[in-house]
Image: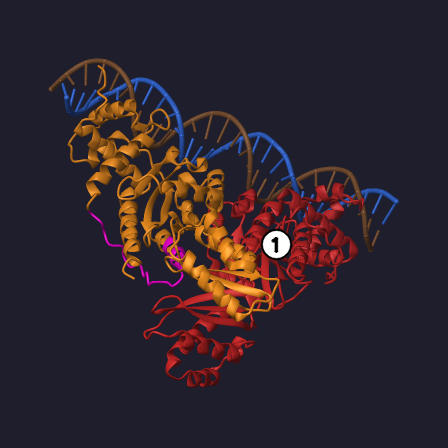
Chain colours: A orange, B red, C brown, D blue
Amino acid sequence: MQLDDRLDDRKVKILQAIIRNYLETGEPVGSRTISKYTDLNLSSATIRNEMSDLEELGYIVQPYTSAGRIPSDKGYRLYVDTMMEEKEREVVEMKEMLLEKEDKVDNLLKQVAKVLATNTEYATMISTPRYQRNKVKFIQLSRMDKNQLVAVIVVEGNIIKNNILDVEEELDDETILKLNILLNTHLNGLSIDEINLAMISALKQKAGIHSDIISNVIDAVAEAIKSDDDLEIYTSGANNIFKYPELSDNQKASELITALEEKQQLTEWMHEGLEGDDHQGIQVYIGNETPISTMRDCSVVTATYELEEGMQGTIGIIGPKRMDYEKVITTLKSLKNQLDTLYKKT
Amino acid sequence: MQLDDRLDDRKVKILQAIIRNYLETGEPVGSRTISKYTDLNLSSATIRNEMSDLEELGYIVQPYTSAGRIPSDKGYRLYVDTMMEEKEREVVEMKEMLLEKEDKVDNLLKQVAKVLATNTEYATMISTPRYQRNKVKFIQLSRMDKNQLVAVIVVEGNIIKNNILDVEEELDDETILKLNILLNTHLNGLSIDEINLAMISALKQKAGIHSDIISNVIDAVAEAIKSDDDLEIYTSGANNIFKYPELSDNQKASELITALEEKQQLTEWMHEGLEGDDHQGIQVYIGNETPISTMRDCSVVTATYELEEGMQGTIGIIGPKRMDYEKVITTLKSLKNQLDTLYKKT
DNA sequence: TGTTAGCACTCGTTTGATTAGAGTGCTAAC
DNA sequence: GTTAGCACTCTAATCAAACGAGTGCTAACA
């Protein structure tokens, strides 16, 4: 008999039972367990037949002959997808996330990573928001020293940047005032795309003999807006991986710790993660679906949050493949909501 | 016969041989090994006698009856101390530490931690400099919005801080200018100790109706100077601990990773570490000498560096007790020197 | 008196064999 | 289509024996 590609209802139920049980115990689960566990009233023999089918379809695998079954990546995938549909509406409030509005976004994020790690008992990461199309809001040059200017640049979202500019010639207050006016009138409200070469040379011309300062300021502005080096990632709860035997043998643990420490890779991943958009900004990567090879034994759930218009970042949870997807997803959703609204009403 | 408290020359040689051998292999070392290893031309039996003495004196221990000996904390201590004396003068140049002067000190430090970790194959940490008695160099209030001021505060070492202040009443340019002059004339050159209550109330009085702004600014200044939250610690190379079997069983590895992640503890330690001063700013903590209990199986070597006058920070290397003290210490010394001079000549 | 050879003894580690148990696949009966 | 029964498979746990590195002690030696 040719096996139907489509799963009937009973198979799905059995698969879910297997996965749920495996999530709890971490041990391969046998037919007898399922027979007792489910309310299907089927004998272990029947379950065995069904499991045999499920294995043939690739949803579960046997670690070795005559052991119980564990879910394959494909199995997890099905489970997660169906579960997502079911839970699409339900969003549980996060317990006691004392998210007092920190004045420093960085500290807030660090704290979120930490709380999340303690809460879920998995490792977590959170990327700082990207300010893709951010606009200049305010520029101010001030003389600090004889030969040094402080350039303060505020971009949308009240992100403040400063640079110290060395100047050769001494500038008097009036010149500085003029430059300030010039800069503000021309650059305010512009995003990085809009500050092009033509714009810059026009500015320089107007600045006259002080055109070299303009260059410096423009550089500072560019840096402030693009803020590439500011796209950082905070991780927390790395030690949690030791709670899951399947991740904590020396080899794997070492690789994982390295992956979490090596933020470069994570950054790139989170970066691109901002594009795709599955279920309300939540994405699940199971096993080999993660782009980082050393995480092939893990699952990663990410959520995209938005602090203010255009300021998007990503939160991620890294755990074993048998992570409690349900809890993780609802937790992330709730957190995402909180972050989304936190700065909106400012 | 009562054992002399003092070690004779031969005992020291044997102890050194034991330790050196143990550093290499990580295995308990027996009498026969030493007999062959050293140029003392002694039989294993003689060595056995000496080792028996050394054990009684507490310099080495036996993991179990009839195993070889391994150094005790006391043994390491002696070894490190004598070695330090020998190497006091010798400072090897660090290999290829592309320390191009980063404009951001933070990035520099992160990079140092990383390079150091790769270089030594141990875990590393580095704390950002403390600006203990730092002085205010420049203060500037600017109006950004109708109801928002930007306060820019520059302290010695060109550390720039900003705060956004919400103001209820709208201020005109002249008022702001007056405030700026007031603040600069009174606060410039002062350290945090010197900005006391009397000072503040005097300022407020002079500010007249704008005294509440003064309060806010003072708060911002205080925060900028004390910069407690800026005393951060970067760690790197946590995965290196897996290279040493004696540290990488699950329990210990987990604890260690946690300790490295839990920066609070480290911060306090590094903080107090700045006081004591052993050998040219290098300190060695062996086993239980570390204040962090989960590091009792490790040794930690720290060095204090100074970027600019009064800006001290600490670098630390965390490894197994059998770490290559010689290499670590010379490496740290060289690095310390580089950091010490790097910003001095600016 | 200090050094050495020899030998019995100790104790953790390695090895191999055996056992227990969980789980499967298959067959035959319902 | 479902179930009971049974032989079979494979892992993990257990145990004993052999191993061997290393010691402590004694007696002999220079």
Q: Is residue B85 above or below residue B150?
A: above
Dot 1: what SS?
Answer: loop
Is B103 part of what is drawn in magenta? no
Dominant SS in magenta: loop
Q: Is residue A220 visible?
A: no
Give the quarter of the figure containing the N terminus of chain A: top left
**Which image quadrant for residue B43?**
top right
Instruction: Locate residue B256, reporting x and y percent.
Output: 50, 52
Instruction: Locate residue A246, reporting x and y percent.
Output: 40, 38
Q: Nearer the viewer, residue D2 or D26?
A: D2
Q: Which residue is identified by label 1?
A: B101
Q: Is residue A281 above or below residue C26?
A: below
**Residue depicted at 52% across the width and 66% down the height:** A175
Instruction: Locate residue A102, reporting x and y percent.
Output: 37, 63
Q: Is residue C6 above or below residue A204?
A: above
- Chain name for mark 1: B
- What amino acid does circle 1 point to? Lys
Is A111 part of what is drawn in magenta? yes
Instruction: Locate residue A210, reporting x and y percent.
Output: 55, 60
Q: Nearer the viewer, residue A233 or A171?
A: A171
Magenta-colored span: A90-113
Horizontally, residue B211 falls left or right of residue D19, namely left
Q: Is residue A194 visible?
A: yes
Horizontally, residue A255 falls left or right of residue B60, namely left
Give the quarter of the figure containing the C terminus of chain A: bottom left
Report crowding for label 1: few under 14, some 14 to 19, many 20 or more residues within 10 A (C-alpha). Answer: few
Horizontally, residue A290 falls left or right of residue B225, namely left
**Residue depicted at 54% across the width and 64% down the height:** A149
